[in-house]
Image: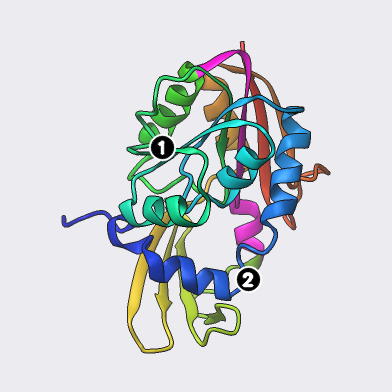
Amino acid sequence: MGDPWWDGFFDRRYTDEWAAAGAFDATAQEVAGVLALVGGAGGLRILDVPCGFGRHAGLLHAAGHEVTGLDLSADQLAIAAERNPGPSYVRGDMRRPPPGPYDVVLNLFSSIGYVDDDVEDLAAIRAWHEVLVPDGVLVIETNHRDRLAKIAEDGAEHPIGTTGGVEFGHVDWVTGRAHRTVRFVDGTERHFDVRMYTATELVGMVREAGFAEVEVFGGLEGGPLSPDTRLVIRARRR
């Protein structure tokens, strides 16, 4: 079967290419949206999973919160320590988070659906539930299948900003998995494979994991969900 695609995907080149493409330009606004959603005035214990190179974790730490960043990529964690010091960075699988306890768990930037089936994603959400304090908050921010159905075009090449790279691929509408290839300007390619859930499916999983007060928005700034928006779920542990 070989190694999972994410083993080599999230390295320094990923960070530099996506940064050059502007993918991380809205980080400050995203953090402001997160804090508005969770009602954080300071001093929250936050788990950012997966944290990548710490772009959210670093700003949350600077805002006075106690942040733990969990990621499986040694490259991403090394960059996080260099560029966004302050949080406690831990290498590990998001299905087995540090015990906490935490007031908030964040899963941002389309960071769910990597594993082979929804059973494993549900296991991750259950694990996040277990490390939250009573009344603790989970925030998931991701793409969703109804939006993908509007924008996906099999085989079409989409530029990665002005880097010269492109992204293309196809969607298996039976399994809900988006099979994508990134071709960098030097011709090298990388592949990723992500399950795209509907809002109905993901909300159902969050409820099955034990969360209550599950609310859905069209972005971290709030607003209604639609096929034109991304998906944000805010839920509380009972």
Of 148 and 135, which appears nearest the observer?
135
Contact, mark 2 vs mark 1 (Cβ under 8 Å): no
**Quadrant of the image occupied by residue 147:** bottom right
Vertical position of residue 125 compared to residue 179: above or below:
above
The residue lying furthest to the left in this view is 1
**For the point 47% across and 65% down, which residue is it?**
15
What residue did someone put label 2 on? 22
Residue 8 x/y as whole percent: 29, 61
Q: Mark 2 Cα within 10 Å, few/some/many (few <14, many 20+)?
A: some
What residue did someone put label 1 on? 118
**Residues at marks 2 and 1, CA–CA distance in whole angstroms:** 30 Å
| Disc number placed over residue 237 in the picture, else none | none
Q: Mark 1 Cα within 10 Å, few/some/many (few <14, many 20+)?
A: some
Would you say residue 147 sits in the magenta stretch? yes
Whichever of callouts 2 and 1 sits on the residue coming sooner in the sequence is: 2
Of 17 and 178, which appears nearest the observer?
17
Q: How many marks?
A: 2
- Which part of the image, by quadrant, shows the N terminus? bottom left
Q: Amino acid at mark 1?
A: Asp
Magenta residue span? 132-150
The residue lying furthest to the right in this view is 223
**Quadrant of the image occupied by residue 123:** top left
Residue 173 x/y as whole percent: 48, 57
Residue 46 x/y as whole percent: 57, 29
**Quadrant of the image occupied by residue 43:** top right
Vertical position of residue 114 compared to residue 154: above or below:
above
Residue 28 x/y as whole percent: 71, 53
**For the point 42% across and 82% down, which residue is it?**
184
- Which part of the image, by quadrant, shows the C terminus? top right
What SS does tag 1 mark?
Answer: helix
Q: Amino acid at mark 2?
A: Gly
What SS does tag 2 mark?
Answer: loop
